[in-house]
Structure formats: C-alpha cells, structure tokens
Amino acid sequence: LLAQGTSDAPLTRIAFGSCATQLNACPIWNEVNEYKPDLLLLLGDNIYADVVDGRLVPSTPERIREAYELLRKDSGFAQV
C-alpha cells in the first residue's frame, strides 16, 4: 500500500480503531489526528445504529445512514 497522494511512498503510520459511538463526544479522534496516520482502519463497530436511549432496537438502513451522518459531523472525525 502506498501513502495517499504519492506514487512510491509506503504506508508507515497505520491507526486501528473500533467501538466509536456517534452519540457521544469521542476525544480519541484528537489523538488519532496528532498521530497523523497514513491510513485509519475502523474494525468492529464504527457506529451504533441499533441502540436508542440505551436500549437495543432493530437496525434499519435509515438508522445506519443517520448514525454515519452524525459521525461525519463530528469535527474530530472529519479531520481524520
């Protein structure tokens, strides 16, 4: 894998993450940004579309879309 925007530089800084809820502030994004990864791999739960008011509910395409939209609006995540 090559670093973004280059033709021959290998990826040297890779960050891994999971279990980031879109419902709460997630200050870890600031740490990830300071690390300046060439690549971020979100493994496992990126969003929680099956939790409403602390209860498990059926996940729907609409809930999934809304959850990713909330995550996208997080300023720290947007910088990653």
Image (cartoon, rainbow, N blue to C red):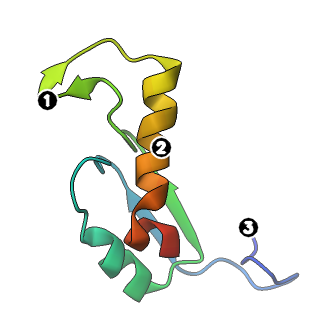
Q: Amino acid at mark 1?
A: Asp
The residue that disc 2 covers is: 68
Q: Residue furthest top?
A: 58
The residue that disc 3 covers is: 1
Q: Secondary structure at mark 2?
A: helix
From mark 3 to mark 1, how far is it between C-alphas? Answer: 41 Å
From mark 1 to mark 2, how far is it between C-alphas? Answer: 17 Å
The quadrant holding residue 25 is bottom left
Q: Residue at x 41, y 71 (%)?
A: 75
- The local crowd at label 2, few if under 14, some if 14 to 19, many if 20 or more residues have their Cα within 10 Å, is some
Does the rendering let one see residue 80?
no
Residue 71, given in percent of the width and then of the height, sits at 42, 52
- Counting residues from the N terminus, which is met first, the one under dot 1 or under dot 2? 1
- Counting residues from the N terminus, which is met first, the one under dot 3 or under dot 1? 3
Q: Which mark is residue 6?
A: none
Residue 31 horizontal side relative to residue 36, left or right: left
- The local crowd at label 3, few if under 14, some if 14 to 19, many if 20 or more residues have their Cα within 10 Å, is few
The residue that disc 1 covers is: 53
Residue 74 horizontal side relative to residue 5, left or right: left
68 vs 39, nearest the viewer: 68
